[in-house]
Amino acid sequence: KFFPPSKTASLRNQITNFMQKDDETLYEAWEHFKDLLRLYPHHGLQRWMIIQAFYNGVTQPMRSTIDAAVGGTLMNKTKYEAYNLIKEM
């Protein structure tokens, strides 16, 4: 499909500026984030950028929960470990 540059930029910004909604659980936030990724499958973002956008977009208490669940800081894991750990939560 053809996306005009303005739509491409808008969708990429939605992904990189993701923010967890106040009433979302971790699972719901991850599903919400994956919906954004599906809207623009050719976003061109590397896996580490996707993980970072999601992690930065969740609330601070949720980041603490994620870090506790993975036994350390999520961002210290490899991109594959981090992605798989989030998928399994």
Image: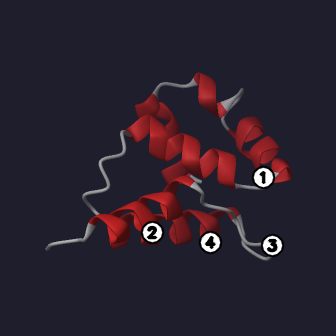
First in sequence: mark 1 vs mark 4: 4
Disc 2, SS: helix
Residue 7 percent across, percent down from the top left: 35, 71
Looking at the image, which is closer to me, 25 or 8?
8
Which tag, 1 or 2, sits closer to the chain's start? 2
Q: Tell me, for residue 22, which label it has, or none.
A: 3
- The residue that label 2 is drawn on is 36
Instruction: Report whether residue 85 is seen.
Output: no
Image position, residue 54 (x, y; %): 58, 51
Amino acid type, label 1: Met
- The residue identified by callout 4 is 28
Q: Residues within 10 Å of mark 2 (few under 14, many from 20)?
A: some
Q: CA distance from mark 2 to mark 3?
A: 18 Å
Binning the other alpha carbons within 10 Å of mark 1 as few (below 14), some (14 to 19) or many (20 upward) gives some
Q: How is the image coloured?
A: secondary structure
Q: Earlier in the sequence, mark 2 or mark 3?
A: 3
Cα–Cα gap, marks 1 and 3 = 11 Å
| Disc on the earlier residue, 4 or 3 | 3
Describe the element under mark 1 as helix, strand or loop: helix
Q: Is residue 68 above or below residue 32?
A: above
Which of label 2 and label 4 is nearer to you? 2
Query: Residue at point 41% right, 33% down?
Result: 80
Q: Position of residue 70 (x, y in %)?
A: 66, 35
What residue type is disc 3 on? Answer: Asp
